[in-house]
Image: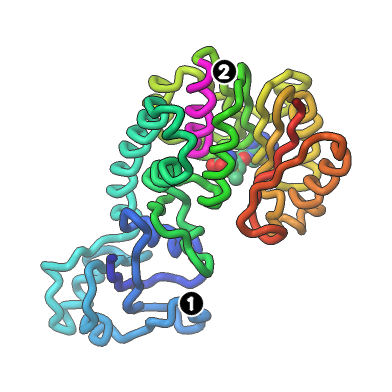
């Protein structure tokens, strides 16, 4: 547990709020006080305090936002608050240090997945612990009952931990020659899915499609999983009509784009087409978003086997599978 004083955090800076949870290995952080807040903003953490009041609280770290260290130190000097012992840093640099450690740990977890026995991969607890060590994105820390036993990091998997682990157990049984993921972001989920498929077939080709290159660790991971291929920048339109055994769609979440990704590649998949955010109502304003797309695609394919993985059914996230064979 790290007890944190935030200095200058804006309530509307949601990215920084999430990133705070990357400051420890398991996302176990507590904001004990906030100073230099913007008074007009709505309260979120509820630990507002004067500088003196804040520094009377036991704390492990002082994280500042939008100011430089000299300014913070000068202010503290005015109050006679010694800062030598404090861990003082702006969020970006503190996260940067931690992320580089997390990235090397992620490479290790991928190695572990590749070297694991089949019975380890099929053991939910083992897999959960491995993916927990690999890390999940910090916004899962903000839900009412956050998942314990997982590390939170901004390089983490952008999926609900329970959902993704159950899905991976299922995916790990798939024999696959050609796979495509449309919308890979940092590649965190891709590497895990590719590793599981690569275990079953060393000749696998796993295409990673995105309009922007945000991939982390690509060079290191491609040495371990030669199956992965960076196809950036590109969209599903560059792969129209190609047959993949496995197709994972998680790109533009508007209704029109989801349907287009389905028409371009999803419908041609031979074994499985998977959609992320099938219950992600935050995209409803995008002409019905992923939820509408999934509802219609389920109807269109009602003669096929449909499987849904969801911890927040009909509310948030969720993985929807159309099983072709
Ligand atoms: C939610 S993220 C993907 C997360 C990733 N699948 C995962 O589970 O970690 C969505 C990604 O889709 C990309 N994207 C947006 N529109 C796209 C498009 N038309 N084609 C391909 N990628 C797109 C974005 O750049 C972003 O990296």
Residue 286 placement (x, y as % from top left): 77, 53
- At a point 79% along the width and 28% down the height, the residue shown is 267
Q: Is tag 2's residue or tag 1's residue first in the polypeptide sequence?
A: 1
Q: Which residues are magenta?
A: 187-201
Q: Residue at x 32, y 53 (%)?
A: 25
Between residues 128 and 228, which one lies in front from this camera angle? 128
Task: Say what secondary structure mark 2 lies in.
Answer: strand
**Quadrant location of the N terminus in the rendered image:** bottom left
Kindly indicate whether the residue at mark 1 contacts the one at mark 2 (C-beta within 8 angstroms): no
Circle 2 or circle 1, nearest the eye: 2
Q: Quadrant of ligand 1?
A: top right
Is 14 positioned to the left or the right of 9 in the image?
A: right
Residue at 62 percent across and 31 percent down: it is 181
Q: Which colour style is shown?
A: rainbow
* Number of on-image labels: 2
Whether residue 155 appears in this view of the structure is no
Distance of mark 2 from mark 1, alpha carbons? 46 Å
Residue placed most toward the observer, 189 or 201: 201
Q: Is residue 168 visible?
A: yes
Residue at numbered disc 1: 44
Look at the numbered disc 1 and give the secondary structure of its residue.
Answer: loop
Question: Which of the numbered marks, if any, corresponds to residue 232?
Answer: none
Q: Residue furthest front?
A: 119
Does the numbered disc 1 mark a residue whose Cβ is under 8 Å from ligand 1?
no
User: Can you tell which quarter of the image residue 112 is in?
Assistant: top left
Residue carrying label 2:
205
Q: Quadrant of the C terminus?
A: top right
Magenta residue check for 190: yes
Q: Could you tell whether 11 is left or right of 322 in the image?
A: left
């Amino acid at each position: 547990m790290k007890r944190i004083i935030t200095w200058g955090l804006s309530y509307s800076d949601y990215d920084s709020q999430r990133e705070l949870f990357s400051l420890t290995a398991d996302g176990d952080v507590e904001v004990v006080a906030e100073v230099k807040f913007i008074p007009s903003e709505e309260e979120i953490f509820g630990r507002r305090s004067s500088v003196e009041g804040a520094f009377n609280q036991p704390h492990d770290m002082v994280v500042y936002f939008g100011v430089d260290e000299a300014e913070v130190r000068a202010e503290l000097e005015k109050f006679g608050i010694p800062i030598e012992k404090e861990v003082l840093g702006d969020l970006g640099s503190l996260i940067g240090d931690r992320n580089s450690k997390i990235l090397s740990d992620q490479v290790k977890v991928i190695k572990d997945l590749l070297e694991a026995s089949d019975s380890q991969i099929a053991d939910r607890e083992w897999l959960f612990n491995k993916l927990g060590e690999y890390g999940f994105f910090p916004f899962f820390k903000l839900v009412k009952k956050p998942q314990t036993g997982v590390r939170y990091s901004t390089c983490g998997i952008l999926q609900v931990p329970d959902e993704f682990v159950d899905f991976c157990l299922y995916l790990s049984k798939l024999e696959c020659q050609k796979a495509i993921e449309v919308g890979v972001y940092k590649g965190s989920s891709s590497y895990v899915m590719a590793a599981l498929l690569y275990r079953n077939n060393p000749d696998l080709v796993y295409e990673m499609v995105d309009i922007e290159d945000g991939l982390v660790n690509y060079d290191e991971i491609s040495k371990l999983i030669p199956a992965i291929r960076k196809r950036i920048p590109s969209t599903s339109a560059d792969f129209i009509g190609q047959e993949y055994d496995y197709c994972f769609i998680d790109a533009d979440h508007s209704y029109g784009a989801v349907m287009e990704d389905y028409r371009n590649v999803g419908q041609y998949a031979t074994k499985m087409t998977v959609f992320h955010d099938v219950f992600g109502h935050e995209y409803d304003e995008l002409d019905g978003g992923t939820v509408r797309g999934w509802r219609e695609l389920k109807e269109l394919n009602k003669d096929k086997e449909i499987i849904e993985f969801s911890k927040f059914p009909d509310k948030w996230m969720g993985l929807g599978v159309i099983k072709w064979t």
